[in-house]
Image: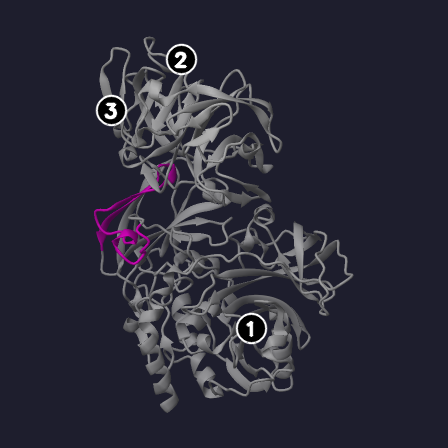
Amino acid sequence: MSKHRSIAALWLAAIFILLGIGSVAAQSQSRRPIYPPGRTLETLNGTISVIWGDPQPGQPGGSQTRTFLTDDHGRTVELSLDEKTLREAGGILALNGRRVSVSTATPHRQAVEKELTAVDASSITPLVSTNAAGSYKAVEGSQPFISIMCKFNDSDETPQERPYFEAMFGDAAPGLSHYWKEQSYGQINLNGSNAHGWYQLPKSRSEYYYSADRMNLSDLFDDCTGAAAEEVNFIEFKGINLMFNENLDGYAWGGTIFKNLDGRSAFWRTTWDPPWAYQNIAVMAHEVGHAMGLPHSSGQYGRVYDNQWDVMSDTWSNCLRTFDPSFGCLGQHTISYHKEMLGWLDGRVTAAAGRSQTVILERLANPQSSNPLMVKIPLDNVGDRFYTVEARQWSGYDAKLPRSGMLIHEVNLLRSIPAQVIDSDLNGNTGDEGAQWLPGETFYGDAGITVTVDSAGATGYTITITRPAVAEKPAAQPFYLSTKRAGKMDGLSFRAADILRYDSQNGLSMFFDASDVGIKKNLSAFSFTEDGSILLALSDAQRVSGLGKVKPQDVLRFTPDSLGENTSGTLEWHLRGADGYLTTNGEKVDALSGSTAACRAPSEEADLLLSTSGRATVYDAAGEKFKAQDEDIINGRSAWHNYLDGSNIDGLAREDINGLWLDPANCDLYITISSGFRIGAAKGNGKDIVRLAASGEQNNRSYEPSLFWDGSMVKFPRNLDGIEFPTAAFP
């Protein structure tokens, strides 16, 4: 009892520190693997397993996702995968449990006397058709775990004893068997779980590192299970919890690993846990979730640990509401998408296309009726993207939720973190009203989807869903772009001054290398002309050879001799901003496109369409002054006309247009927005392209917004700035 009281005191003292860790950065950068001297590799055949890592609270480091291959000779190696390879393979979840052939890049060699531990994977080819993204084998019945306590041979510490671990996995609340019974609606339990140890490992803690900051999880598994082999019949268990007496590499780990134990070759549900992890049962619930195949979820902010509604994200908030004196902070439920993954949602509804329907939605924790627990709303005909809708109330382990309400997640199966909770106020806090949908409120999603909360019942909500008919997913049209910041994608490093070409088949390529022609400042806008030149605007003033000082209110013309990695050509003036009354900070050129006679009134001067960075005061041909905002588009050169009043389009008045292209065939406008937005039915962020479909004549034209390109779907690394689509001059 005294040990339990000391643990409780420790957690209570640390709780307010722990509550602040939700801002831990998401995915860590991949590290270079280590190879033995003289080894060459070409292909490896085997089976993929995925393991997720979570950093110690309050310590530096973000979450990690590690991918392992157990080859046909029983050797386990870690794979280093870039984003392009992952996308082509269907995403990280589609790889889990899949038999594949891995082509390796030329190995980097270091004089390290170790077995092969990691390889660079240049491509992955499935050998059998299994586990399409979102299709998983149900977890059901008894799932006993064996906890094996292992101590490094340079430490005799034993932080907990066997009865502690047996109780932690027990069937009495808040034991993990009790917890997962409630999560699964009685479809699984952890009955029969046991614990053994402490066993001494053959090596010191430092000897299990294969790089400066990464431990060999495969070796830890082999040595810890090997130490227990005489006392444990592994055939009796489905999962293995490896409990260590010292810190590991700053992380607790959970996932599956393909190994042979007691004659059974299988994916063993496994956790690797240091003392700080198993002294808090919420962490153990999280890692056991990974062992069952669950990924992380998140908010809309690129951070892993900011979804307060999911044990697979933020387990630390609201701990005082559900604190146990023996086992610390308790976990909440996981989200409906994860429960569907594991086969626990018999009652769910898929929203039908082309109509509205009303659904009575039952709460996710401790349901009291047979009403559905989730509504799935597809966003395309492929099945990679969809919304989920669920009801959450304070009940059972969900007593630690920030509040009660209806919850919506946007799921993209090609992301490493598929589910993101919709937080309408985009303030970084998923625990306030922004993520809570209540009676009278309506969610406006992509593709014209709406979800309205009609009323609240004792244990759920009545909602109405409108889902327009889903068009066939078109092939992605190539386009040209510039970005707000420098970045890297598909092996290409780029600056915010460069122009890039993107297409879905070949990824990103260099089109205009600004450094080759002496442009040092970022581009704020660009546009192609019919004669094969390129118009450019700079974000800040700089001196350009032969031209002198170029201001961000000016427009240059670049006539290329060559483009791509070796860009060359001539720069000249196209528009001096002062000649067009563009002189102030608010009148910097922010977006730029060519004009066309078919899309303007006959009396208007045809040259440029542009949007400014802020409030602009310009003059028309009659000398009449008018004002334009950063959501407006003006047309002209020395005299200007108001081409688009952004305040006439729902939601656009709150935004800043920073990329622009006019389609001369139909006068549709394509725009980028500086940050998160909701314009009509189109919702997205700075990585996306919005189409404003035009109808009517100029001066009486209306526009219908829709999301044209979702940059998050392809994991585009930076917010877009300028955009342009292929022309005859630049196909």
Question: Disc 3 marks which amino acid?
Answer: Lys
Give the vertical position of 181 relative to 578 (above or below). Answer: below
Which image quadrant: the N terminus?
bottom left
Q: In the image, which residues are magenta?
A: 427-456
Q: Is residue 448 magenta?
A: yes
Question: Disc 1 marks which amino acid?
Answer: Lys
Residue denoted by label 2 = 598
Q: Few, some or many C-alpha atoms within 10 Å of disc 1 (few <14, some 14-19, many ≥20)? A: some
Q: Is residue 170 visible?
A: no
Question: Mark 3 or mark 1, which is nearer to you?
Answer: 3
How much space separates mark 3 and mark 1, taking CA atoms?
69 Å
Residue denoted by label 3 = 627
Q: Few, some or many C-alpha atoms within 10 Å of disc 2 (few <14, some 14-19, many ≥20)? A: some
Residue at the (42%, 27%) spot, across then down? 550
Residue denoted by label 1 = 238
Q: Secondary structure at mark 3?
A: strand
Among the two numbered marks 3 and 1 on one chain, the one whose residue lies closer to the N terminus: 1
Horizontal arrangement in the rendering, residue 399 relative to residue 689 (left or right):
left
- Residue 176 screen position, x and y as percent: 43, 75
